[in-house]
Amino acid sequence: MHINLFYKKQHVNGGSDHNQKKGGSMKSLLKRHVFTLVALASCSLAFAADKGSADDAVALVKKAAAHLNGAGKDKAMADFNDPKGQFVVKDLYVFVNDMNGNTLAHGGNPKLVGKNVMDLKDADGKPFIREMYDVAKSKGKGWVDYKWVNPVTKNIDAKSTYVEKVGETIVGSGIYK
């Protein structure tokens, strides 16, 4: 966008009424720019507010684990796969894999349901899914760090995923750092 500040100078120094009607004063131009900057900053803050925290991810996994145990596998998987359901919060979603690496539910990418992701590697070649299984089997729950394509920025970003072993499944949710 090109802004002609010299056009406005004529009015400020006693220009015609035509200039005032057409563009206004430097002061009004400045007000419009400040308003635009405030609006852009608000959009950035709104995006940040829509970004889930580590605490949000843990809470979502715990809620999903309780739902899986209470509602049963079939109902829970349908709920976890619902992109408008209660298990997609801000930019967070729940995924569930069986102990062989098969995706049973994925709120962020339903195309992964039914696929085996055990050998999936991150941008650096790290077998992060295997690490999730190792953490879940050995500790019952924990965080795994890796690099993944952020669907918002399209950049490869650092990501951390919290996982818990629930019965014979692994329930997880991840955050971009």
Image (cartoon, helix red, strand yellow):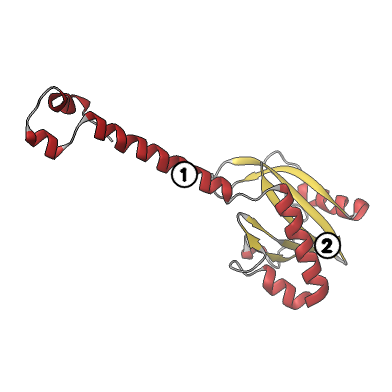
Instruction: Give above or below for 5 relative to 112.
Output: above
In the rendered view, does 139 fall on the left or right side of 67? right
Looking at the rendering, in which quadrant would you find the N terminus?
Answer: top left
User: Which of the two discs, 1 and 2, sits closer to the camera?
Assistant: 1
Q: Is residue 121 visible?
A: no
Q: Quadrant of residue 10?
A: top left
Q: Position of residue 92 (x, y in %)?
A: 65, 55
Q: Secondary structure at mark 1?
A: helix
Q: In this view of the protein, which residue sits in the foreground, 19 or 96?
A: 19
Between the C-alphas of marks 1 and 2, the distance is 44 Å
Q: Earlier in the sequence, mark 1 or mark 2?
A: 1
Residue furthest out toward the right? 138
Q: Position of residue 176 (x, y in %)?
A: 65, 45
Q: Circle 2 sits on which residue?
A: 100
Q: Secondary structure at mark 2?
A: loop
Q: Circle 1 sits on which residue?
A: 42
| Amino acid type of the residue that numbered disc 2 sits on in the rendered structure | Asn
Q: Which mark is residue 138?
A: none
| Amino acid type of the residue that numbered disc 1 sits on in the rendered structure | Ser
Q: In this view of the protein, which residue sits in the foreground, 17 or 83?
A: 17
Q: Quadrant of residue 2?
A: top left
Q: In this view of the protein, which residue sits in the foreground, 22 or 74?
A: 22
Q: Is residue 147 visible?
A: yes
Residue at (75, 77) in percent of width and height = 74
Residue at (61, 46) in percent of width and height = 149
Label 2, residues with CA under 10 Å away: few <14, some 14-19, many ≥20:
few
